[in-house]
Amino acid sequence: MAYEPYATLRDYNTYGYDVISDGKLEKRLKQASRHIDSLTFNRIIGKGFDNLTSFQQEIVKECTCELANFEYENEDVIQSVLQNYSINGVSMSFGSSWNVMVQNGVAIMRTTYAKLMQTGLCSLSLRW
């Protein structure tokens, strides 16, 4: 069975996003879904998306769309091997900052991760 992303084109449009073109959207949503799996320790795959509560499903769909959009808009920075650099006194760093964090190897906005945590699927101490 093929891996299905947690959100669809319809979901993406429902949440008001229109940055990613239709031709690239499925690939981006699939990548974001894989990253959601990393952030939730594969609990969604283990339990099955349809077995989540409707609240959890809605949050996972929304976070998938947000993450896909974030990764698309910031691809160059995320893919960079540099963590920080400085030129003529101006510096830039990537990693944990006030609005972006790296969790389980996934760069994600703190607000998106906080929303995903509401599902209860991100806790290491949780036993499923």
Image: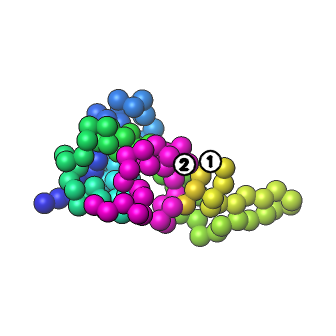
Residue 65 x, y percent position in the rendering? 39, 42
**66 or 77: nearer the eye?**
66
Q: Could you tell me which residue is drawn at 58 percent across and 56 percent down?
A: 101
Return the residue at label 2: 109
Q: Could you tell me which residue is drawn at 25 percent across and 41 percent down?
A: 53
Residue 5 x, y percent position in the rendering? 27, 50
Return the residue at label 1: 99
Q: Could you tell me which residue is drawn at 31 percent across and 37 percent down?
A: 55
Residue 87, label in figure? none
Which residue type carries mark 2?
Met
Q: Is residue 103 left or right of residue 53?
A: right
Residue 66 x, y percent position in the rendering? 44, 42
Which residue type carries mark 1?
Asn
Residue 31 is drawn in which quadrant? bottom left
Q: Is 109 in the magenta?
A: yes
- Quadrant holding the C terminus: bottom left
Q: Which residues are magenta?
A: 103-128
- Quadrant holding the N terminus: bottom left
Number of numbered discs overlaid on the protein picture: 2
The tag earlier along the polypeptide, 1 or 2, is: 1
Say whether marks 1 and 2 touch (CB < 8 Å). Answer: yes
Secondary element under disc 1, as helix, strand or loop, is loop
**36 or 82: nearer the eye?**
36
